[in-house]
Image (tube, grey):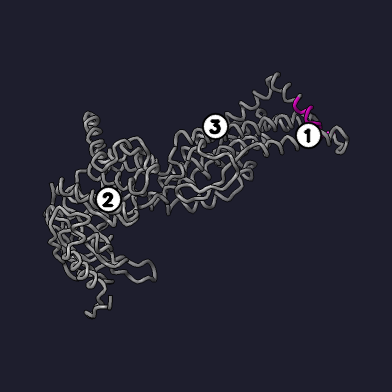
């Protein structure tokens, strides 16, 4: 089912394979709610319901956002954050997909490495930033490493589970055609796992941005995280909120872009 | 092109894990399908029929005895032995179009022959009644059509032996009859050896030259019945033949009979 097939009403549909899936439905009520909340914010600040220097009206924040964009400072910060997020994300993708497939298909490596991964996985990534600073300093190496570490786990886990849950019938079918092990890997296992891998990649897309910003807050001299902390010290809540708004916009755009790519590159998603 | 396939005193034991006892799937089975023969194997559910086919395909190995293709024991998936699964949807490659699914067995060959092979695959799709569906994806087709794709793919692999593992049990009754007729036509044209596993006695008689009847667990071979109905078979004439009814009676009675030889009332 492609996005175009989804009827424009909010309901729960059954796909051909019988899995229940939520249909997004019309966006109008959701957009209305957002507009109403923003109006409430504006009103609460202007009418003096909330009296605080840190609660500027939405209109001020929008003005600040426009000024930020015109000055270019937010773009520079966003670019720095996105660069770190992207490098860490790519490293995590390569490692996560490769290890996920290898461990799912190799019993010896699985027995050797899985306990280690299971121990490291539940650890909150930000918790190891302070000790890591001692080894990696406070520059890019630290931030990219943290992003990669945090993004690795969802990608690894979904890939691993995805390979392990390939239906046996599919593998046996391929075996009876006597294909090489290379072709089994690239021609059967990898495409059969792609929907699962995509799910992990999508989770990591938002996670890498979160962790990049966080690492810039703790130790940094550039990026949106650093900018946010700076504006906090400078008592400029309007610029802070505006930067948060740009982050939200970036995250949203990344997710939408990812979904569009997914629909185009993996049309069999959810069909097996 | 066809080859004989035989089970020579084959025993298959699945080792239980931990405290579970070992599970004897079947014990000392000897059975052979002659070249170009259509052999059906019927037995109650869970008697290990599919396990026999998996052994024949080289997907698993026997505990004792051997499975022989021609004169060579099978110890890995042999060339020319193709497996048609019951779960057609799970055996098709969802990321490949219909024509690319059919092309799958041929892609080890040199690229220079690709265009010729593609034309050949279109012909196989036409033979199974799927002309015009080449560029669809399997999940866009009905169940019966998906199994037709799997049949076309089996043809592309140029089978000497075709193993049919209850291939029609997951489709509706009318589609089942159409697919049975289709498989018979293809078998008569190509003359591969066919081994069908089913719990549908009518289907076994309609398709096969001989029907092997398996008993309940631990499974052994009870008897082999010659069908002897004239070919080409016809969905009406064959099924209304008094000999067909007699065979159905005998095989069903044999399946229902307990180990002490007592025939359960039907």
Give me the chain letter of mark 3.
A
Query: Which mark is first along the chain, 1 or 3?
Result: 1
Q: Is mark 1 on a helix, strand or loop?
A: helix
Is B11 placed left or right of B133 in the picture? left
Asked if badges 3 and 1 are on one and the same chain, I answer yes
Give the CA separation, mark 2 to mark 3.
46 Å
> Where does the image place residue B107, in percent across and percent down from the top left?
26, 37
Q: Residue at x 27, y 78 (%)?
A: B264
Q: Which residue is drawn at 72% across and 25% down?
A: A65
- The range drawn in magenta is A53-62
For disc 2, the neighbor class at 10 Å (few under 14, some 14 to 19, many from 20) is few
Please check the rendered image and state whether residue A242 is part of the magenta-colored stretch, yes or no.
no
Residue matched to label 1: A39
At numbered mark 3, what does the secondary structure look like: helix, strand or loop? helix
Q: Which chain carries label 1?
A: A
In the picture, the quarter occupied by the C terminus of chain B is bottom left
Please identify, in this view, whether the residue under mark 2 or under mark 3 is nearer the observer.
2
Looking at the picture, does residue B162 appear above or below residue B248?
A: above
**Mark 2 and mark 1: Cα distance apart in space:** 65 Å
Query: Which-is-in-front pick, marks 2 and 1?
Result: 2
């Amino acid at each position: 089912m492609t996005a175009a097939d989804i009827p424009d009403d909010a309901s729960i549909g059954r796909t051909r394979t019988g899995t229940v899936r939520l249909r997004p439905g019309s966006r109008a009520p959701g957009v209305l709610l957002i507009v109403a909340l923003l109006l409430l914010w504006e009103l609460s600040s202007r009418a003096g319901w909330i009296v605080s220097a840190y609660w500027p009206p939405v209109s001020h924040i929008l003005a600040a956002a426009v000024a930020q964009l015109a000055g270019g400072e937010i773009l520079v910060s966003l670019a720095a954050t996105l660069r770190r997020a992207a490098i860490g994300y790519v490293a995590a993708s390569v490692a996560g997909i490769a290890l996920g497939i290898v461990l799912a298909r190799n019993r010896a490596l699985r027995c050797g490495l899985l306990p280690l991964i299971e121990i490291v996985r539940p650890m909150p990534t930000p918790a190891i930033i302070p000790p890591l600073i001692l080894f990696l300093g406070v520059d890019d190496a630290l931030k990219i490493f943290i992003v990669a570490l945090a993004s690795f786990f969802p990608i690894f886990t979904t890939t691993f589970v995805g390979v392990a849950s390939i239906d046996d019938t599919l593998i046996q079918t391929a075996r009876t055609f006597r294909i090489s092990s290379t072709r089994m890997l690239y021609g059967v296992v990898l495409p059969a796992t792609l929907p699962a891998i995509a799910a992990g990649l999508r989770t990591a897309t938002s996670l890498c941005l979160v962790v990049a910003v966080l690492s810039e807050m703790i130790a940094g001299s550039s990026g949106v995280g650093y900018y946010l902390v700076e504006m906090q010290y400078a008592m400029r809540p309007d610029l802070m909120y505006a930067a948060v708004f740009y982050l939200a916009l970036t995250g949203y755009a990344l997710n939408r872009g990812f979904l569009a790519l997914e629909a185009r590159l993996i049309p069999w998603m959810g069909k097996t | 092109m066809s080859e004989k396939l035989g089970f020579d005193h084959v025993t298959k034991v699945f080792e239980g894990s931990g405290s579970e006892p070992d599970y004897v799937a079947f014990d000392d089975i000897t059975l052979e399908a002659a070249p170009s023969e259509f052999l059906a194997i019927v037995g109650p559910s869970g008697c290990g029929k599919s396990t026999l086919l998996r052994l024949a395909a080289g997907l698993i190995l026997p505990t004792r005895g051997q499975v022989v293709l021609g004169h060579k024991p099978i110890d890995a998936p042999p060339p020319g032995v193709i497996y048609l699964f019951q779960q057609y949807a799970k055996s098709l490659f969802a990321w490949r179009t219909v024509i690319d699914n059919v092309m799958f067995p041929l892609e080890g060959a040199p690229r220079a022959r690709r265009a010729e092979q593609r034309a050949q695959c279109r012909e196989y799709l036409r033979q199974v009644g799927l002309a015009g569906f080449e560029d669809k994806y399997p999940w866009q087709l009905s169940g019966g059509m998906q199994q037709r794709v799997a049949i076309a793919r089996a043809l592309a692999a140029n089978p000497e032996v075709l193993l049919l593992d209850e291939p029609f049990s997951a489709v509706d009754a009318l589609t089942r009859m159409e697919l049975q007729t289709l498989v018979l036509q293809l078998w008569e044209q190509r003359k591969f050896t066919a081994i069908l596993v089913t719990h549908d006695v009518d289907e076994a008689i309609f398709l096969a030259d001989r029907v092997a009847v398996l008993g309940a667990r631990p499974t052994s071979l009870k008897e082999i019945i010659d069908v002897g109905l004239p070919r080409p078979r016809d969905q009406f004439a064959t099924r209304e033949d008094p000999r067909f009814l007699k065979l159905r009676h005998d095989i069903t009675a044999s399946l229902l009979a307990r180990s002490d030889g007592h025939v359960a009332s039907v």
